[in-house]
Image (cartoon, rainbow, N blue to C red):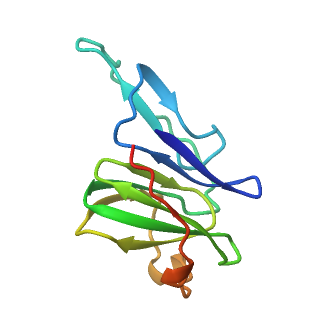
Amino acid sequence: MVEQIMHNDTLHAIIIRNNYTADGVHFFTPDQMSQQLAYMRRPAGHVIDPHVHCPNLRSVWLTQEVLLLRSGKVRVDFYDSQRQYLESRVLYAGDVILLANGGHGFHMLEESEIIEIKQGPYSGDADKVRFQGVEEDVIESRDRKG
């Protein structure tokens, strides 16, 4: 239900499948990551006290992003920082993925709706380097539904 994509001791992604459930609050990311990802399940009547967040200057060296697949089916292809293909995973409606390091590409296996959350401000094409993806006959996809 929660999967880490690792390569050479580097976290490339965290996938939280749509059937994941747990009580309370669970963080999937270490405190030092610039993008934090957590799951919360609280009973009816639980209160989170009103609050504001304090100004806190942070340095972000690498854009990380979270995708929520609202509908459809998407293959994610993972690459290392040298643009070498590693492996692939299939995401389904309701799955969430945090893309932390390395490269990634997407192949829509069905019409899909995706919500993307990442650090800003976005600087357009200066924010990424595009490259040729892996050939279809090389794909090593682990289709792990739930």
Q: Residue 45 occupies which quadrant of the picture?
A: top left
In the foreground, 137 or 57: 137
The image shows residue 137 at horizontal and vertical percentages of: 52, 82
The image shows residue 144 at horizontal and vertical percentages of: 45, 51
Q: Quadrant of the C terminus?
A: top left
The image shows residue 70 at horizontal and vertical percentages of: 25, 54
In the foreground, 52 or 107: 107
> What is the tally of numbered marks visible in this picture?
0
What residue is at 46 percent from the left and 66 percent from the top? Answer: 76
Task: Give the answer, above or below, for where 75 lies relative to 9.
Answer: below
Q: Is residue 106 left or right of residue 142?
A: left
What residue is at 59 percent from the left and 47 percent from the top? Answer: 4
In the foreground, 122 or 83: 83
What residue is at 53 percent from the left and 85 percent from the top? Answer: 135
* Residue at the far top in the pictured view: 45
Q: Is residue 86 left or right of residue 28?
A: right
Task: Give the answer, above or below, for where 23 lies relative to 85.
Answer: above
The image shows residue 57 at horizontal and vertical percentages of: 59, 48
What residue is at 25 percent from the left and 61 percent from the top? Answer: 72
